[in-house]
Amino acid sequence: MILLIDAGNTRIKWRVVVVAAAEPLRALDEGALAHDGVAALAAVRSRHPGLRRAFGCNVAGAEVAAAIARACAGLALDWLRPSAACGGVRNLYEDPARLGADRWAALIGARRLHPHACLVVTAGTATTVDLLAADGDFLGGLILPGVELMQQALAQGTAQLPLAEGRFTPMPRRTVDAIRSGCLQAQAGAVERMFRQIAGEPQALCLLGGGAADSFAGLLEIPLRRVDNLVLSGLGALAAAHDGH
Ligand SMILES: Nc1ncnc2c1ncn2[C@@H]1O[C@H](COP(=O)(O)OP(=O)(O)O)[C@@H](O)[C@H]1O
Ligand SMILES: CC(C)(COP(=O)(O)O)[C@@H](O)C(=O)NCCC(=O)O
Ligand SMILES: [K+]
């Protein structure tokens, strides 16, 4: 039994899985926590006394990593480090170690789910838009502010723009709708433009996940599959491989 952890800049996503020989991974339990709620992992551990190991990725900094390590005291805890090749994916980043560990795990999860050309989009605090070739090469990708960060940037950097709930509309005629629609169109536009680079490939598909995915999924006019927690699936695949199953 393994505790998988995806520590992002907004939330910590976790999943408890069972690894058994010749069987697919089975998820027993999962959830998401705010950074200041990480101590709740103790309750997860007491629900699953069979836990011995934890395997995670963290892009939220050293303090969050330390808080997770405290909550996981007594478990063997390993962190995923991006490498040049792993899980059927080759990392063509100039310096492979600089790729976000969450992006690396998501690419590995994506490769297992759809072993064809795909665009791996994670709409979290930041939105990442990563190109995975049919042969498993990670070709490169975009980092842009996530939907909420875009809206916050406008409110903080201007005199007249509020941080208010707007609605998406194709032709916005109110400030709040113009802001919301602008930020959503920016996300969708970046995704569709990146998808053009693989659109001609057989079975090319966009895999979209992350906490903000539903806010613009409906705008995308490309082959699309909504997937939850691709990062945790990638981590699970690697953890199972390490266990020798
Ligand atoms: N219950 C929620 N709590 C926090 N963020 C949420 C929630 N529901 C949707 N969101 C959106 O999801 C984003 C965070 O997504 P998530 O995938 O957890 O990010 P990260 O991996 O960066 O921590 C937020 O910026 C916000 O736009
Ligand atoms: C791009 C990210 C900030 C995304 O983080 P998230 O939105 O999941 O919290 C993270 O993957 C990161 O810090 N990456 C390191 C730089 C890189 O991937 O090039
Ligand atoms: K992200």
Image (cartoon, grey):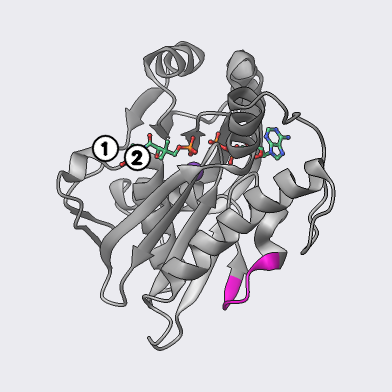
- Locate residue 132: give its quadrant: bottom left
**Magenta region, residue range:** 219-224
> Residue at label 1?
81
Disc 2: residue Cβ within 8 A of ligand 2's nearest atom: yes
Question: Is residue 221 part of the magenta span, yes or no?
Answer: yes
Of residues 107 and 152, the one nearer the viewer is 152
Residue 25: where, in percent of width, then height? 50, 55
Residue at x 15%, y 43% (from the top left corner)? 95
> Residue at label 2?
101
As drawn, 150 above or below 230 = above
| Secondary structure mainly formed by the magenta segment | loop
Determine contact: label 1, label 2, CB under 8 Å. Answer: yes
- Locate residue 48: give its quadrant: top right
- Mark 1: which amino acid? Arg
Of residues 24 and 78, the one nearer the viewer is 78
* Mark 2 nearby-residue class (10 Å; few <14, some 14–19, many ≥20): many
Of residues 131 and 241, the one nearer the viewer is 131
- Secondary element under disc 1, as helix, strand or loop, is loop
Residue at x 43%, y 58% (from the top left corner)? 109
Disc 1: residue Cβ within 8 A of ligand 2's nearest atom: no
As drawn, 75 above or below 151 = above
* Mark 1 nearby-residue class (10 Å; few <14, some 14–19, many ≥20): some
* Figure disc tally: 2
Residue at x 19%, y 46% (from the top left corner)? 96
As drawn, 24 above or below 16 = below
Q: If the image is split into quadrants, where does the C terminus sit?
A: bottom left
Residue 240: where, in percent of width, then height? 38, 50
Residue 161: where, in percent of width, then height? 72, 31
Residue 42: where, in percent of width, then height? 60, 17
